[in-house]
Image (cartoon, coloured by chain):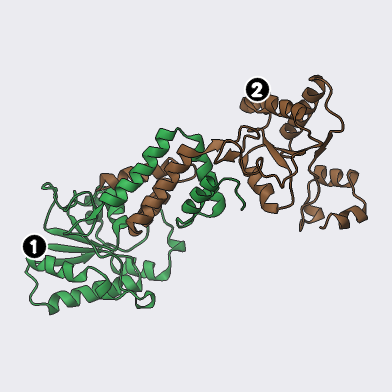
Chain colours: A brown, B green
Amino acid sequence: MIFSSSLLENAVNEFAKLPGIGKKTALRLVLHLVKQDAAEVTLFSDTLAKMRNEIKFCKRCYNISDKELCNICSNPLRRQDMLCVVENIRDVIAIESTQQFNGIYHVLGGIISPLDGIGPEELTIDALVDRIKKEETTEIIFALSPTIQGDTTIYYISKKLSASGPVPAPVKITTIARGISFGGELEYADEMTLAKSISNRIPVENFILSGS
Amino acid sequence: MIFSSSLLENAVNEFAKLPGIGKKTALRLVLHLVKQDAAEVTLFSDTLAKMRNEIKFCKRCYNISDKELCNICSNPLRRQDMLCVVENIRDVIAIESTQQFNGIYHVLGGIISPLDGIGPEELTIDALVDRIKKEETTEIIFALSPTIQGDTTIYYISKKLSASGPVPAPVKITTIARGISFGGELEYADEMTLAKSISNRIPVENFILSGS
């Protein structure tokens, strides 16, 4: 692409550095910004710069946060004894958006995946074990990807928990239910999912009580 | 989507204002920026703000420009007597990228399209007519979309040119060739294109001379 304006060219190149944005899309976005009020574009650029400079990671749960402690950890209305372990910040947003969980989180920063070079020391597993020892957690819910890597991570953390001395009883360790998606069709479900959904079948009264 | 950080939420909302960027894509882009160095993000936001604040439109051809007169208009090596009329800035970039055109441009800002509420007065047609009268143009090349609207615009401008007094001879008015795309297959071409490509057939010697 040949530009007659270096201001335009620089802006397009900056946009094209973002993941999934090619040169043509970048040009479309930049030309959209050119058409906006200067104040709008200033707001856009200031918001991004402010976000990057002021954003923190919660020192307790490693969620993205405006302050030292994130809104979820510092909310007295949330159950501080229910800990949901997730892979990343996107998962926190996804679970929060369901408005069904009223506990707190722990963001691992990934899952154990030796092929991608991610071992336990890259994740916040030690901090999680420390938290469980210190805080009065009654239930740990693992909400990780239903993959071999996710299962390995759950297994590793459970072992680590029992190896690091007695887990304060009564700590319940659970994982999110795996089964057929709402609206999904049985015949298209993979064998593994279907098999698990049969072996982990739930009494209909529980099902109705859980409000689904 | 429920965010636990208002900095994150604001940044996502700003990104989601861009055309074709939904909330999920916006979140992906913002989380990418969070992972970058602060200096990188500052560069990104500064480049955009600077671009919007300093960008100008060339007072001669209405192309996007860093200065009063764009790089193309002020380049003494380009033929100032060959004027290519295009719809928008993207078309200038597309033609420049072919490196086959050595004249100057005129950006109309759109084409006449009554259904979209775009009449001749919304476009830079008057400025174009003025330029042709004043500058020593020898050829006007219309590089507009090959649609009814494009053809209407060409027709309107030609009429306007002859109505506004004698066009300085010798001004040649041409339009880009319409035909089968390079690599295209005859059987998939629409009838209109195929018919035009036969009626406007070119001698093979011209074809070879033009370097295709």
Q: Is mark 1 on a helix, strand or loop?
A: loop
Regarding residue A39, the answer to whether it shows in the image is yes
Q: Which residue is drawn at 34% across and 59% down?
A: A35
Please rate how many residues cluster around mark 2, counting C-alpha atoms within 10 Å: few if below 14, some from 14 to 19, many from 20. Answer: few
Image position of B176 with respect to B148: above or below: above
* Residue occupied by mark 1: B135
- Find out whether the residues at labels 1 and 2 contact each other: C-beta distance under 8 Å: no
Q: Where is residue A64 in the image (x, y as percent from the top left)?
A: 58, 39
The amino acid type found where label 2 is placed reads Glu
Q: Would you say A169 lies left or right of A189 here? A: right
Q: Which residue is drawn at 85% across and 47% down?
A: A197
The amino acid type found where label 1 is placed reads Glu
**What chain does mark 2 sit on?**
A
Regarding residue A2, the answer to whether it shows in the image is no
Please rate how many residues cluster around mark 1, counting C-alpha atoms within 10 Å: few if below 14, some from 14 to 19, many from 20. Answer: few
Q: Would you say B88 lies left or right of A113 here? A: left
Q: Position of residue A42 (x, y in %)?
A: 36, 51
Q: What element carries label 2?
A: helix
* Residue occupied by mark 2: A121
Q: Would you say A67 lies left or right of A196 here? A: left
Q: Where is residue A189 in the image (x, y as percent from the top left)?
A: 78, 50
Nearer the camera: disc 1 or disc 2? 2
Residue B3 shows which numbered tag?
Answer: none
Image position of A131 with respect to B55: above or below: above
Quadrant location of the C terminus of chain A?
bottom right
Q: Is B4 in front, or is B164?
A: B4
Disc tally is: 2
Q: Which residue is drawn at 70% across and 53% down?
A: A98
Image position of A53 with respect to A194: above or below: above
Same chain shared by disc 1 and disc 2: no
**What chain does mark 1 sit on?**
B
